[in-house]
Amino acid sequence: MNEKKMIDIAREVLNNAYAPYSKYRVGAVVETSSGNFYTGCNVENMSFGLTVCAERVAIFKAISNGEKSITRVVIISDDDSIPIPCGACLQVMSEFSDRDLEVIVSSRDGKLERFKLADLLPNPFKFNKEE
Ligand code: THU
């Protein structure tokens, strides 16, 4: 799927966002290493800390469907600001991707930026588990 199609789908999924508190709706599409695509939107909660971001919803949908890794993430907001993923989402991305994961972000008015995960999160959390 080309980037434009991913952006169009993310923009559609944004309509499913449950964001009555922030009124900031976000849509996401992730591509997996097996070539499949999963969508997500932000889902807020009255207990604000339980809110889950759009990109994390999409990643968890992918992993729970048996996908092993992600290769591209598109995130769209319905605001004029570009939705740079939060630290929690970047850490989740780093769990399931290479450092060169492509992260494409776009705003309502069409501003678009492309990043590598390594640029957004140069030092993800890691520990050395016993083998
Ligand atoms: N949000 C996302 O879904 N993705 C981002 O990249 C940034 C923030 C959501 C969480 C919350 O519902 C709203 O945006 C405001 O923080």
Image: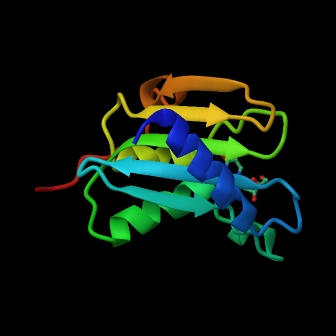
- Image x and y of residue 117, in percent: 45, 31
Q: Position of residue 51 (x, y in %)?
A: 70, 67
Q: How is the image coloured?
A: rainbow
Location of residue 36 in the rendering, given as x and y in whole percent from the top left corner: 33, 55
Q: Is residue 124 left or right of residue 87?
A: left
Residue 110 pos. (x, y %): 74, 29
Does residue 111 lie above or below 67 as drawn? Answer: above
Query: Is the C terminus in the top left, top right, bottom left or bottom right quadrant?
Result: bottom left
Q: In this rendering, is residue 78 above or below 57?
A: above
x 52%, y 59%: residue:
39
**Which quadrant of the structure image shows residue 94?**
top left
Q: Is residue 86 in sight in this rendering? A: no
Q: Residue at x 65, y 26 (%)?
A: 112
Q: Name which residue lies at 84% across and 34% down.
A: 80
**From this viewpoint, which residue is outermost toward the bottom?**
46
The N terminus lies in which quarter of the figure?
Answer: top left
In this rendering, the count of numbered labels is 0
Q: Is residue 59 left or right of residue 47?
A: left
Of 3 and 124, the residue lying toward us: 3
**Residue 44 found in image quarter:** bottom right
Along the line of sight, which residue is nearer the eye, 64 or 128? 64
Task: Left or right? Give the position of 102 relative to 5.
Answer: left
| Residue at 38 percent of width and 63 percent of height | 62
Near-viewer residue (118 or 57): 57
Residue 96 seen anywhere in this rendered image of the structure: yes
Residue 64 position (above or below residue 31): below
